[in-house]
Amino acid sequence: MNLLKRDHDILYLIASLEAGEDRINEALKAGVDVIQLREKGISSAEYLKRARLIRRMASLYDVTFIINDRVDIAVLSDADGVHLGRSDLPVSEARKLMGEHRLIGATARTPKEAQKAQADGADYIGSGAWFSTRTKSDAVFLSRETYGKIRRSLVIPSLAVGGITAENCREPIAMGADGVAVSAGLLGESDIQNAVLLFRANMQQ
């Protein structure tokens, strides 16, 4: 699957296996478009083990599988792509290792960063934080004005990230986001299937 060919707004899940294999499976089954595995504070060996598990799970539901930060883990686990932060490998260098058939996402907080990532071969951009988030306590808010400039500077998809829930996801979509990246806003819900349906309904309004 290629997230760039979706015919609706993209629901992109960012998850750690710490959330629980069962809950991640529920989200995949419920119909998220993409899952990004984001692990911190574990060994490379354990990261690869978890990546291969999520690779198998994502394949069962035809969900695009992305690895956060680690190009080596993405390649070794046969992920569909990698998402690179501002301090990770440059997109142009990652492309040499990933090849042309895998996706590369990049974080951008300014139009200049977004344009450079696009020019270097990124397939999509993630920008935030939109709202306060439990996942990243040090997240810096992105102004709506800046996001609008980022979106207008791109021809590749742009995802809104940071504190997004089913209740507040309409705002970034209304501003032109092609989808939303969520973590606790989905996995923190008691009924994940219903939460996915609510995201879908609100993004389409």
Image: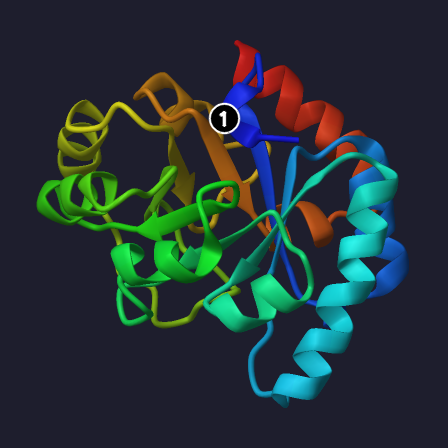
Label 1: which residue?
Answer: 4
- Residue 47 x %, y %: 67, 78
In the image, is 102 to the left or to the right of 116?
Answer: right
Kindly state the secondary structure of the residue where label 1 is placed: helix
> Which image quadrant for residue 52?
bottom right
Residue drawn at (41%, 71%) of the image: 137
In the image, is 13 to the left or to the right of 105?
Answer: right
> Which image quadrant for residue 97?
bottom left
- Residue 18 x %, y %: 74, 72
The crowding category of the residue bearing disc 1, from other C-alpha atoms within 10 Å (few below 14, some 14 to 19, many at least 20), is few
Establish if 147 lies above or below 120. Answer: above
| Residue 19 seen in the current view | no
| Residue 85 seen in the current view | yes
Residue drawn at (58%, 63%) of the image: 74
> Which amino acid type corresponds to the residue marked 1 in the rendered image?
Leu
Residue drawn at (18%, 40%) of the image: 119
In the image, is 109 to the left or to the right of 44?
Answer: left
In the image, is 135 to the left or to the right of 124?
Answer: right
- Name the quarter where the N terminus is drawn: top right
Front residue (pair 88, 38): 88
